[in-house]
Image (cartoon, grey):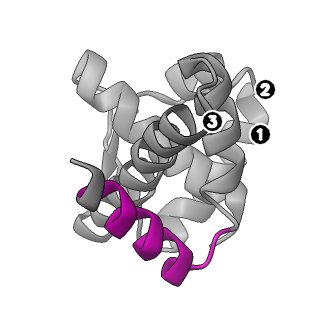
Amino acid sequence: MHESGENYLETILMIKEKKGVVRSIDVARTLNFSKPSVSRAMGLLKDQGFISMEQGGDIQLTEEGMAKAKSIYARHLLLTAFLQEVTGVSEELAEENACRMEHILDQEVVDGISSYMEKRK
């Protein structure tokens, strides 16, 4: 899955947790993307089996979509905490960098960071 698809899934999960329901307009506003761009992306995610769209326009993560979104979000949280702890940067800066890093790191690297952070607790 491409970075953009991962960003959409993570955003859908975050909106769902905050508001309870997710609509394309919520995703567009959150990501500051145009409605047509979001609509196209939702179609692709639906075709790939990550989301379903209800009659009223509500977006639901499928079981596979939920698992993927939670995995991406867990990486985000882990990397944010790691960057803050190791570099001492602000949460905002750590979060911005974690958002970019979470999509490109190999799982082995993420597992190593996770192990490092667990040992530090």
Name the amino acid type tagged 3: Thr
Q: Which residue is mark 2?
A: 34
Pointer 1 with pointer 2, Cβ within 8 A: yes
Q: Amino acid at mark 2?
A: Ser
In the displayed structure, 2 sits above or below 78; it is below
Residue located 28% across and 19% down the image: 18
- Position of 47 with respect to 40 (left or right) is left
The residue indicated by pointer 3 is 87
Q: Position of residue 35 (x, y in %)?
A: 71, 27
Of tags 2 and 3, the one toward the viewer is 3
Instruction: Give yes or no for contact between labels 3 and 1 (Cβ–Cβ under 8 Å).
Output: no
> Which image quarter is the N terminus in?
bottom right
Could you say which quadrant of the image residue 5 lies in?
Answer: bottom right
Above/below status of 108 relative to 86: below
Q: Bounds of the magenta span?
A: 105-118
Q: Earlier in the sequence, mark 2 or mark 3?
A: 2
Measured Cα–Cα span from mark 3 to mark 1: 36 Å
Amino acid type, residue under disc 1 in the picture: Ser
Q: Residue at x 58, y 31 (%)?
A: 95
